[in-house]
Amino acid sequence: MTAIRDSLARYVVVRRALGASFYEPALALGHFVDLLEHEGAEFITNDLAMRWATTPVLVQRATWGRRLSQVRGFARWMNVIDSRNQIPPAGLLSARRRRNAPHIYTEQEINLLMIQVARLRSRTGMRALTYSALIGLLVATGIRPGEAFRLDRSDVDLVNGILSIRESKFGKSRFVPIEESTRAALERYARSRDRLCPLRLSEAFLVGERGMRLKAGTARSMFVRMSRAIGLRSATEDGRDGCGPRLQDFRHSFATGRLVEWYRAGLDVSRELPKLAAYLGHVNVGLTYWYIEAVPELLELAAGYLGKNRPGERS
């Protein structure tokens, strides 16, 4: 282990001791240290920080800004140890971003994806089973993709139908009840997984072809391929994957689906929203209100509901 990688390990321990889950930044900074080691750099430089931050293509500038911000925090830590480590100036790349409008999956699109999943071939047959379970889980529960990847077997209560989401985004943990059909589907997956992978090589609930935890990057790449196969995503002129629906959009579809149901049923959505916010693991209900602004149908339903329920007016 190099000195800088050893320092990163200590930095991650301290950040987590202060209450941050620090999962994604730790992975990202590990890749940054890979670059430093490849270049033979003993110290962080602004040039290397910028080169690493701007490596991804076809992403928003805010993604570059977020990556550079992650390096900046680590660089401050390293600068205290040795002042030769440079701290990238604030504002060099803006980390602010506008949230993309969510893609709300139709029932037909989900069916096409599941048909495509069934066509996936692999040596053991695990690939089709795992991706079917992953997409079904995201559709049925609205949990974050990262939460699904981090589920251990002990987090999935197949008797009572409850998922334990541990220290997810913002360090929050919660219990997520699931419907009987979802519980039964996950139970069938678990039985097939244990039959095809009798040697338990990981405590992960969702596993890849070799029985190890399904990796987020691998799953997202596979989802892009499946999306392109059914026409949900197109390629750019240079052959790279263009923009299109993401795994995260299953969460958006779940949330907006619930809100549409409540408005159509005439429920007081302002009373129901805190329940949805707690279920989704939002730190405040304002994050859940964003869905109303982002989806035109919800704006129309909300306007109609308010129009019929203004104080002092009779329908």
Image (tube, grey):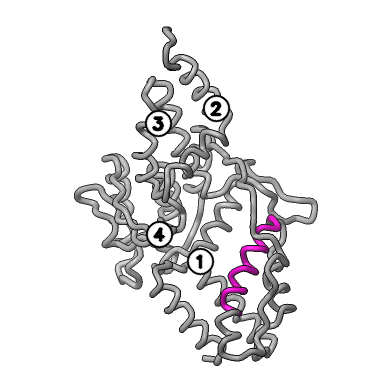
Amino acid of disc 2: Leu
The magenta span reads 60-75
Q: Is residue 214 visible?
A: yes
**Local crowd size for mark 1, using a 10 Å CA cut-off: few (<14), some (14–19), many (≥20):** few
Inter-mark Cα distance, 2 to 3: 14 Å
Secondary structure category for the residue under label 2: helix
Secondary structure category for the residue under label 4: loop
Circle on res. 168: 4
**Local crowd size for mark 3, using a 10 Å CA cut-off: few (<14), some (14–19), many (≥20):** few
Of residue 241 and residue 83, the one placed in the foreground of this image is: 83
Q: Position of residue 133 (x, y in %)?
A: 40, 50
Taking the magenta stretch, the answer to whether it contains residue 71 is yes
The residue wearing badge 3 is 270
Question: Magenta-highlighted stretch: main secondary structure?
Answer: helix
Inter-mark Cα distance, 4 to 3: 25 Å
**Local crowd size for mark 2, using a 10 Å CA cut-off: few (<14), some (14–19), many (≥20):** some
Amino acid of disc 3: Ser
Q: Position of residue 6 (x, y in %)?
A: 50, 88
Placement of 247 over or under 25, stated as above or below: above
Considering only order in the chain, which callout, 1 or 4, is on the residue closer to the N terminus? 1
Circle on res. 116: none
Of residue 138 and residue 28, the one placed in the foreground of this image is: 28
The residue wearing badge 1 is 24
Amino acid of disc 1: Glu
The residue wearing badge 2 is 299
